[in-house]
Amino acid sequence: MTTLPEIPDEDLLRLDHQICFSLHAASRAFGGLYRDALKDLGLTYPQYLAMMVLWEHGTLPVKRIGEHLRLDSGTLSPLLKRLEAAGLVRRERSPEDERSVTVTPTEAGLALREQALNVPRRILAATGLPLEDVIALRTMLESITANLDNEV
Amino acid sequence: MTTLPEIPDEDLLRLDHQICFSLHAASRAFGGLYRDALKDLGLTYPQYLAMMVLWEHGTLPVKRIGEHLRLDSGTLSPLLKRLEAAGLVRRERSPEDERSVTVTPTEAGLALREQALNVPRRILAATGLPLEDVIALRTMLESITANLDNEV
DNA sequence: CACAATTTAATTGCGCACAACTGAATCGCT
DNA sequence: AGCGATTCAGTTGTGCGCAATTAAATTGTG
């Protein structure tokens, strides 16, 4: 609130362009870096994020994975099918609630975590920023995301 | 360089997850906000970015637009076709270099800029961050993107 | 208990991002 | 001038993200 109302629309339009584009571009630049780093693991970046959640929490219903990743079943269903086809997870309907599908990492899925351990150091190094800056960035981004989600 | 090599792989994996996911999520959260704000203009967020470039620079070849947006023809060709179909731009092969296609905003495309002027203030307000923080964020993101692009 | 409302995954359709490739025009080198 | 290398836009194929819809199971309410 009170975002300096004296700035002209023209300048704000340009600033908006710069900020939102920079976020868009940074996100895609990271994606490209991950694409390379994850090629050996046979994972895409979103698949890697999903495996991360499963490595941390073990078996989870699709719904919970979606909450962690801020994704709905429209995105997750095909993604998890691909992970299943790759032999990294098992998907099975929950016995106590037949609506729910639980996802569990397989042996191969768990083993993949070992190969993933050396990925982050490469990525963080490539940012060219000191660790504390990167952590500050994360904090700011999380704050923005929380605000934007509540805004709707 | 010198990114505190004493941090264990395990923690780094978790940190990596948090940082890169937060970037991914923030980018998508912005996208969602723009989707709403741009619905009246009939533009998607990437289309809005392309129009921004054209509003600022006037006529440009596809190549130059791609440099500004960090996008290749595989993404831009269909996107610009849609803008053309919407009557917002004209696309014509350059007479002096038949390989190149120049893109020019039409009257309707230029007029759309007026409607876009009030979009950024809404977006920036929704971030819930003071302007100087948002500008600092932009600077950090640009620095990261530049580093990541050079890394490859 | 019956039945409407809600929850959960999955599917469909559209647009974007990117890799790999094609085809045409231009450039550069000899 | 000739011709291989490069540049540029476009196309194809794959995967992601999201809105809208569908189908089935569960919950809540009268």
Image: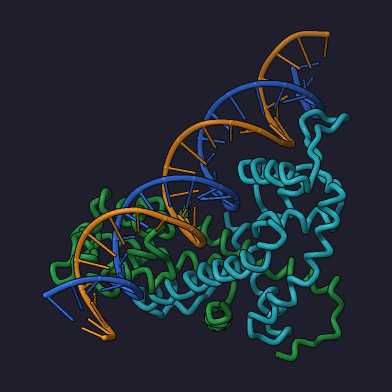
Chain colours: A cyan, B green, C orange, D blue
The foreground one among A20 and A43 is: A43
Q: Is residue D11 above or below residue B144?
A: above
The foreground one among B150 and C9 is: B150
Residue drawn at x 42%, y 71% as measured from the top left: A17
**Left or right: where does residue C5 sit relative to residue A51?**
left
Residue drawn at x 80%, y 74% as measured from the top left: B12
Residue drawn at x 79%, y 38% as measured from the top left: A91
Numbered-mark total: 0
**Left or right: where does residue B12 sit relative to residue C29?**
right
Query: Is residue A134 visible from the viewing direction of this image?
Result: yes
The residue most toward the bottom is: B2
The foreground one among B133 and A98 is: A98
**Left or right: where does residue A17 sit relative to residue A117?**
left
Q: Is residue B32 above or below residue B139?
A: above
Q: Locate the C terminus of chain B and report the quarter of the image it occupies.
A: bottom right
**Left or right: where does residue B21 sit relative to residue C12?**
right
Query: Is residue B131 visible from the viewing direction of this image?
Result: no
Residue drawn at x 40%, y 80% as measured from the top left: A7
Q: Locate the N terminus of chain B and report the quarter of the image it occupies.
A: bottom right
How far from the left and from the top, in percent, is residue A58? 87, 51
How far from the left and from the top, in percent, is residue A38? 68, 63
